[in-house]
Amino acid sequence: MHTTVHLLADVPPQMLPARSLMAFTLASHIILVPLGVALPLITLIMHGYGLRKGDATALLLARRWSAVMAVQFAIGVVTGTVLSFEFGLLWPGLMGRWGDVFGIGFGVEAWAFFLEAVLIAIYLYGWRRLPARTHFLLGLPLPATALLGAFGILAANSWMNTPQGFSLDDQGNPVDVDVWKAIFTPMFGPQYWHFVVAMLLTAGYVVAGVYAVGWLRGRRDHYHRLGFTVPFTVAAVFTPVQFMLGDAIARAVFHKQPVKFAAMEIVWNTDTHVPEYLFGRLHPDGTVSGGIKIPQLDSILAGFSPDTRVTGLTSVPADERPNATQATIAHWAFDIMVGIGSVLVLLALWYGIVWLRRRRLPASPWFYRSAACAGVASVVAVECGWITTEVGRQPWIVYQNMRVAEAVTATRSGALWTMFGLIVVVYVLIFGAFLAVLLKMRTRWRLDDERSGAGAALRTPETDTPYGPRPAVAAGGTAAGPAAGRGDGPAPTEGDGR
């Protein structure tokens, strides 16, 4: 108890508002990240399918998803820029001392961001204005730029978890920086691939969930079947891969960050035959209340043997490890993430078994109810992953090299709380506008689909073929002929979908 009071007394008053502000903005931004990283790939898969099969519906879905991708990117610009400023404003100690070592990651991310903006603009502009093959080929670099942006961010974060690539002078400042070692740290590979696959399956489940809701509401046409099948298949394929990658990164944490692993598994004393707790709460005296205790399982999971020695939190002094509350938070976040991942594996197996046996989508409403929930559950799992990573590293902002308290700004806590309140208001408006735009787009698309369903004569510019001349639309909403459109050669029919 006295140790806890002493630790709290050493915490600067501005730590809580700075942490709260950073946590809020990061948690908000990461909601958008799966679509930013993975939606370009899913869109291009649908685009390529439409071109190969001559499927105009697939091309229409790809064009609409590209519009969502652009809106999401615009919102991500705002939230990502806020985060960039916060690194300098809230954590000047981190950037001032260590920026020369790991700042290259942020530079790579910024370069990828601008390149992605240009490519999205070209891709959006290309619909109906470029030859089909040229347009598709110009879109192919989009997923690579999204992965490059993730590369930069994960390089910076993995360095904070396992810092290397520098020496320290007499004043404790980094010198002799080796950029390559600073980028490719021991945790970079496990973190990067775990993150990328998480984005792919999350985006897949989110997009598929929209069409799963449509299926439950009776919309079972080709448009909704295709809109569900492509992204859900992507997510289902990557879900078991992610489960194996998750095991690999947990094992990497066990070897490279043993104290963080102890927090994730609420292990108090170093020992063998360590039990696994599903949830449960760690107390400052090392006892655990609640949860489900499974004897020896933690040692078995960590080293494939009950004799595996697992490092406990008490292996380091109290001021060099997460406290009991932080360890419990990291543990719950880790368990929720693993639990969601396990359920998603079962959902993917359900889908795969039905498809392999019957070559059709599952017919059970419970499958589509589960699929509709999978997108939200995936986002929750992503949030929990970041909580595990960041809270489990406490009290270090740079593992074993700089504490969070040393990096925090000297700005008065009152000013930080005011900034926090303003950011919350701004983000509510931003995400409200984002939701309003998406709902407006959905309504317009649905109305256009209803008009086009009444007959070819009512086809509008929104639902006509994505390539070739556009039909001019008369005042009454009927097509007036192709003369007003632009094209590159003869206009294809809807059947060939070029």
Image: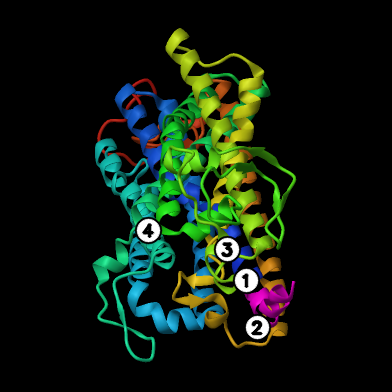
As shown in the figure, which amino acid type bears the numbered disc 2?
Answer: Pro
Counting other residues with Cα less than 10 Å from the Cα at mark 1, is it few (<14), some (14-19), or many (20 or more)? some
Counting other residues with Cα less than 10 Å from the Cα at mark 3, is it few (<14), some (14-19), or many (20 or more)? some
Q: Which residue is mark 2?
A: 12
Residue depicted at x 32% and y 29% = 51
Alpha carbon separation for disc pair 1 and 2: 11 Å
Residue depicted at x 64% and y 34% = 373
Residue 64 percent location from the top left of the image: 48, 39
Range covered by the magenta-colored residues: 1-19
Q: Which residue is mark 3?
A: 314
Mark positioned earlier in the residue sequence (2 or 4): 2
Mark positioned earlier in the residue sequence (1 or 2): 2
Q: Which residue is mark 1?
A: 19
Residue depicted at x 32% and y 88% = 169
Alpha carbon separation for disc pair 3 and 2: 24 Å
User: Is 263 positioned to the left or the right of 305 in the image?
Assistant: right
Mark positioned earlier in the residue sequence (1 or 3): 1
